[in-house]
Image: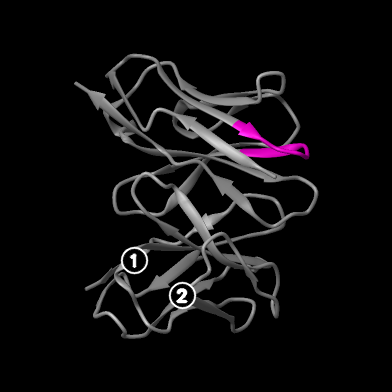
Amino acid sequence: AQSVTQLGSHVSVSEGALVLLRCNYSSSVPPYLFWYVQYPNQGLQLLLKYTSAATLVKGINGFEAEFKKSETSFHLTKPSAHMSDAAEYFCAVSGNTGGFKTIFGAGTRLFVKA
Amino acid sequence: NAGVTQTPKFQVLKTGQSMTLQCAQDMNHNSMYWYRQDPGMGLRLIYYSASEGTTDKGEVPNGYNVSRLNKREFSLRLESAAPSQTSVYFCASRTMVDTQYFGPGTRLTVL
C-alpha cells in the first residue's frame, strides 16, 4: 500500500526566503514521486518527478526535491521565494511496477509575504 | 495540442438530478482518471481507466459511474446528485507510471 503525508497544510514565507515543503511517503514497492502545483482555479501541473535516477531532482521555476530513502522523504525546496510561487502544492506517489494509481497528499498551501 | 479538456466548467444541480461530466485528451494516453478535490483532502480517485475498454473503481466510487467511450474520451456520470457530491472534479490522463496531465476542472454545486 502507498500513502503520502504532507506536513503542514499552510506554509507562509517572506519573499526571498527559503521555501521548504515537507513530504513523507510510504510504499511497498520502489516509488515514483512527484510534486504538482495548483494555481487558483486551475488544474494541477507537474513541478518535478523522481523516477529512480538521480536522487536530487530539479524542476521548473527553480524548485528542487531530494529523494531520501532512509527517511522516506521527498521534500520540496526553493532557495528564494517569489510572490508568483503562492499556490497549493501536492506531493504524490505511484509504484514503478506498472500500477496505474497515483496517491496524492492533502496539499500544502504556500503563502508568500511581500 | 489542447491537452486534457473538460466540460462543463461550472454546474449547479438540485438534489436528485443527473449529469455527465465530459473529458477528452489528445495526447494518445492509455490511462485516464477522474478525481474529486475537497478542501483539506487533496485529490481522491473516483474511477480510472487503465486502457480503452477497461474501468476500475478508485477510492470514492459510490454515487458515480464512468464510461471510456474510446481512447480519447472518459466521462463521469452522477445518476442522482447529492449535496455530498459538491466538489471540484478533475480529469487526468497519463502513460503507464509517468506524469499525469490534468484538465482545468469542473466546479459542481449540488443544492
Q: Earlier in the sequence, mark 1 or mark 2?
A: 2
Question: Could you tell me residue A13's position as x and y percent?
Answer: 30, 19
Residue B52 lies in quadrant:
bottom right
Query: Magenta stretch containing residue B45, yes or no?
Result: no
Range covered by the magenta-colored residues: A25-33
- Residues at circles 1 and 2 in contact by the CB criterion of under 8 Å: yes
Question: Could you tell me residue A75's position as x and y percent?
Answer: 54, 24
For label 2, the residue is: B63
> What's the residue type where badge 1 is placed?
Ser
**What numbered label is drawn on residue A24?**
none
How much space separates mark 1 and mark 2, taking CA atoms?
Answer: 10 Å
Q: Residue at x 44, y 69 (%)?
A: B5
Residue B95 lies in quadrant:
bottom right
Q: Residue at x 37, y 44 (%)?
A: B40
> What's the residue type where badge 2 is placed?
Gly
Whether residue B94 is visible to the viewer of this picture, yes or no, is: yes
Chain of the residue on which disc 2 is drawn: B
For label 1, the residue is: B84
Q: Is residue A67 above or below residue A44?
A: above
